[in-house]
Image (cartoon, rainbow, N blue to C red):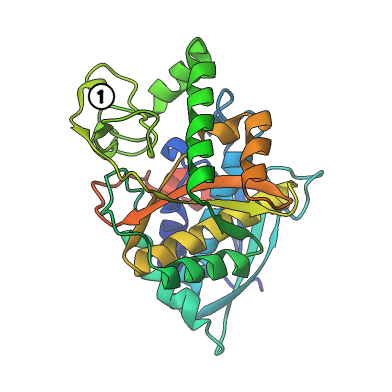
Amino acid sequence: MSEQLPQAHVDVLLAAAVAAPSMHNTQPWRFDVQGRVIDIYLDGSRTLPAEDPTGRAMRIAAGAATFNLRCAAEALGYGTWFGLAPYPREEPDLLARIVVEPTEARDEELADLAEQIPRRHTDRNPSDPAPIAEGVRVELMRAAHAEGAELIWLGESEIHAVLDLTLQTDLREIRDWRRSAERAHWIGGTRPAEGIPSTALGPRPATYPATVRDLGTRPLDRLRRQSAFETHPDIAILCTDYDEPADQVAAGAALERVLLVATRAGVSASFLNQPLEYEDLRTKVQRLTRRPGHADMIIRFSHTHPGPGTARRPLGDFLPKEQQ
């Protein structure tokens, strides 16, 4: 167990982990590598106190990073076993502990999904009008279930209800300068290592409320070209039965598995999570599923037309100084 992983393999594992999505591309992770054990911590310096006051989005991001690391390990010929939020009271910032060991019983599905990690990007462009194929929908549901979550596709009336909730969110935010300032800190302009650059925002929706979240905060970003988005979007809710830290990390793993399976099928995604930033609206989103549980993500799926992705910081930034 104490044998150190080769540095080249550590680099591959961490590069896969940090390619995971995070809210506003804050990349809120820290890693500690000891022998064959990799711990994933929250980076408290990269919080979003206005938009993510409970840290739920950060924990989801940690779960997505954990899943990517597991996929990369399988591609390198390792197996993994892991615990999510193993010490919630003693070490609340420790969200995953992953043991990486050689194995002859490779998980071929995870190894295959590792190839999709560099291809996955959030896609804020209009989609083709054709709906997502039923077989793909079922495959994405199975992907969520494999990680302990549920992906629930919404019907037309529920989709309109979600858009109404995004409108309610926008009305609440009109005079909330803290949220506006926080978003402007991470979004727009040139972002060579973190955040969302203007080039990744996609076009402005021509109608409102829209099936994509317009994250533009700067005057020039609000002058982006307009486009008409699909009138019958494919939207699903990712939810878990419970809402403890470990459940939120598991939701992140389920999210990333869904996104990688979608990428392999030629489907991309963007997110309409703004109602989930308010607990009362989050409850209303969950009610739309007609199931008990807790909504973690609102996902719009589309036929892939991805634009530029978002950059990541150097790997050394995620490690203690002695491991850089």
Residue extending furthest left?
225
Q: Is residue 28 above or below residue 2?
A: above
Where residue 213 appears, as percent x and y from the top left, is 39, 34
| Residue in front for this viewpoint, 229 or 252 | 229
The furthest residue to the bottom: 104
- Kindly identify the residue that appears in the image at 54 percent across and 66 percent down: 141
Residue 35 shows up from this direction: no
Residue located beneath label 1 in the image = 221
SS for tag 1?
Answer: helix
Decide which of 296, 96 is in the foreground and name it.
296
- Give the class, few, some or many, for how many residues have Cα within 10 Å of label 1's Cα (few <14, many ≥20): many
Q: Position of residue 177 (x, y in %)?
A: 49, 11
Q: Can the viewer see residue 166?
A: yes
Quadrant of the frame with the N terminus: bottom right
Instruction: Measuring from the top left, give residue 68's x and y in whole percent.
Output: 48, 62
Tell me which residue sits at (65%, 44%) in the image.
286
Q: Residue furthest front?
A: 157
> What number of labels is visible?
1
Q: Is residue 239 left or right of residue 310?
A: right
Residue 155 drawn at (x, y percent):
51, 51
Q: Amino acid at mark 1?
A: Asp
Q: Is residue 297 above or below residue 168?
A: below
Which sits in the foreground, 294 or 12?
A: 294
User: Which residue is at 47% across, 39% downward?
Assistant: 272
Q: Nearer the viewer, residue 142 or 186?
A: 142
Residue that appears at 26% across and 51% down: 306
